[in-house]
Image: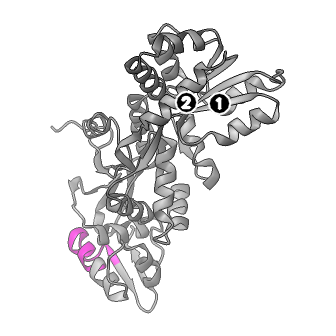
Amino acid sequence: MTEHLPLSGFRIGVTAARKVDEQVTLLERRGATVEWAPALSLDPNHVDDAELRAATEQVLAQPVDMFLATTGIGMRTWLDAAERWGLLPDLLTTLGSAEILARGPKSVGALRRRGLRELWAPESECFEDVLEHLRGRPLEGRRIVVQEHGQSLSMVAHALRRRGAHVTTVTVYRVQPAGDPEPVFKLVDLVCDRALDAVTFTSAPAVAALMDAAGPTGRRDDLVGAFQADVVAACVGPVTAAAFELWGVPTIYPDRSRLAAMVKQLETELPSRRSGLTIELVGGHQLLLHGEEVLLDGSEVRLSPAPAAVLNALVANPGNVVSRPALLAMLPSGTAGSEHAVEMAVARLRAALGTRAVQTVVKRGYRLAVA
């Protein structure tokens, strides 16, 4: 007997550019079908060496009172670059004499690797909690260095300056968009068409990139609606999840910001949302849906996207009539935009489930023939 894997029958989109092999392997070993669409460049963290060195020399020019470390990769990249330039001892001395606040465990690890110790880090890993930690503290005249994390923290710097601090931002890297946007456009369509059960995100810029891609195609509202209703937005941690708050999209994320923990959460979340819906059909047949898996009387039924979309619409309204226009709206992108396409999809569905499984209601539409 074949072992049933926890994500068997589920289709999951992956937006990561880094550590993608690890994530895809974790998902596929659990039975998931993966659609990979890197939202950012495969080498997303572009470092401007000259700009970074100039910022480093500016940091070294005066004593630093407080240092805010935001990402592990940013800290490692900066300190490694300083080592190449022969500036590492001076930089470690300067930062080591300051009060160090770290955003999360990855930045903590990068600091400790070079002998630096943070005085405080939030459990949430949210930068907003770092700022909250500073609220009420006198910052007038204090020199604060902020390591930016791929996206500009100019508003954070401005907020600190309003409180009288002298702020220097160090831009270690900037995230870059995907070199080939076509996979991202395809992912947008898959989400909008409810052809995916979940999409994973490992960075806030990836969320922004997907939303940006949906704008020019006119599908941003559809994308948000799909995430709000049917497609799970799975984030690696609270920082990434916060990027969805602007759009009102619910997210799931694990207690520990790790890939394995995110995948483990999907193992529980997805089956609980679609936990083997069973429908009794006329003629004594039993229909079982689990993720993308469709079983008729215990035997797997393979459906192409159009009849699968029709089945999902009918299953959502078992025994009730679903109109042809409503079914047409559910068909995947690229399907001919006429009711004939609905008729063809219904015909294929009947061929797979039996002619009596889907009933025609004249001048109204179709319904699933439940017992």
What residue is at 42 percent from the left and 48 percent from the top? Answer: 176
Residue 86 position by quadrant: top left
* Residue 314 in sight from this viewpoint: yes
What residue is at 37 percent from the left and 85 percent from the top? Answer: 337
Mark 1 residue type? Thr
Q: Is residue 262 above or below residue 85?
A: below
* Residue 103 in sight from this viewpoint: no
Q: Is residue 16 above or below residue 88?
A: below
Residue tagged 1 = 168
Task: Please report contact status of discs 1 and 2: CB closer than 8 Å, yes or no.
Answer: yes
Give the number of callouts.
2
Give how far across and how far down residue 346 sits, in percent.
30, 78
Of 112 and 171, the residue lying toward us: 171
Quarter holding the C terminus?
A: bottom left
Q: Is residue 174 magenta?
A: no
- Please, what secondary structure does the residue beneath circle 2 have? helix
Question: Is 53 displayed left or right of 341 in the figure?
Answer: right
Find the distance from the CA under tag 1 to the CA under tag 2.
8 Å
